[in-house]
Amino acid sequence: MCGLQRIRRECEPRVIKQHLAAGLLQAGLREGLTRAQHDQLMGWTKELGLGPQIVELAENIAIH
């Protein structure tokens, strides 16, 4: 079984989204994001109910 299938089987969808959002936030802070990536990240911040400091960091990521 591949790693992705195992993750889907063993982890709650919310946990997966939290990890993806964290990775996208880190990448965005380093390198910026495309509009689609930024929109996805902002959607996750709202869906996951992340705190205002995280939302502010995400809002200020450069878009390219």
Image: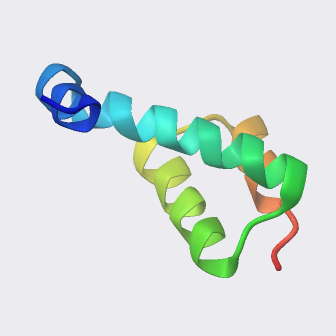
- Check the picture and name the quadrant holding the C terminus: bottom right
- Residue 49 location, x and y as percent? 49, 40
Question: Which color scheme is applied?
Answer: rainbow
User: In this view, which residue lies farthest toward the top?
Assistant: 10
- Residue 48 location, x and y as percent? 44, 41
Which residue occupies the foreground of this view, 21 or 53?
21
Q: Residue at x 49, y 32 (%)?
A: 19
Instruction: Count how many numbered circles sit on residues in the image.
Output: 0
Q: Is residue 63 above or below residue 30?
A: below
Residue 19 in sight from this viewpoint:
yes
Residue 56 in sight from this viewpoint:
no
Q: Is residue 26 above or below residue 43?
A: above
User: In this view, which residue lies farthest toward the front?
Assistant: 1
- Residue 43 location, x and y as percent? 49, 61
Query: In which image quadrant can residue 15 be found?
Result: top left
Q: Residue at x 58, y 77 (%)?
A: 36
Q: Residue at x 23, y 23 (%)?
A: 11
- Check the picture and name the quadrant holding the N terminus: top left
**In this picture, residue 54 sits left or right of residue 10:** right
Which residue occupies the foreground of this view, 57 or 51?
57
- Residue 4 location, x and y as percent? 26, 37
Which residue occupies the foreground of this view, 3 or 30?
3
